[in-house]
Image (tube, grey):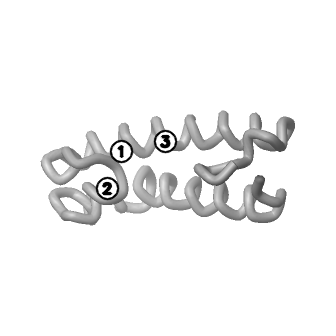
Amino acid sequence: MLSLFIWIAAHAAEALFCLWVLRRGGAERLEGTFASGFLFSNFAPGWSAEGLKMAALILLVFCAVSFIAGLFVPGLRCWGSC
């Protein structure tokens, strides 16, 4: 189980990344690169900037839901090692 500080820091980093892709031109920088495949999906290098923005929006929503769930139920704060 992760500590509350690490839980908040990890979700803040993920949210900042998603906001960078959505609002600060990150989608245009990642479009067609190998890094987009590593960060989103194996199919992401073929996606347009709009597709990357949609993936980032879906990840941001999932991030918010899992953050709230883990905030109130500490047993959910594990990533593969619980």
Q: CA distance from mark 1 to mark 2?
A: 6 Å
The residue that mark 1 highlights is 53
User: In the drawing, does residue 41 fall left or right of residue 15?
Assistant: left
Q: Are marks 1 and 2 in contact (CB under 8 Å)?
A: yes
Dot 3 or dot 1, earlier in sequence: 1
Question: Residue 25 got which mark?
Answer: none
Q: How many marks?
A: 3
Question: Which is nearer the N-term, disc 2 or disc 3?
Answer: 2
- Crowd around label 1: few <14 · some 14–19 · many ≥20 (10 Å): many
Residue 70, image x, y percentages? 76, 41
Which three-letter amino acid code belongs to the residue tagged 3?
A: Leu
Would you call the spot at circle 3 few (<14 residues within 10 Å), some (14-19), or many (20 or more)? some
In the image, residue 71 lies at what x, y percent? 82, 43
Above or below: residue 82 compared with residue 32:
above
| Residue drawn 19% across the image and 63% down it | 33
**Along the viewing direction, whichever of 20 and 4 lies nearer the viewer:** 4
Circle 3 residue:
59
* Along the line of sight, the residue nearer the viewer: 64 or 48: 64
For residue 27, which numbered disc appears in the image?
2
Rendered residue at 65%/40% (across/down) = 64
Give 61 or 19, whichever is nearer the viewer: 61
Three-letter amino acid code at the position of disc 1: Lys
Secondary structure under the numbered disc 1 in the rendered image: helix
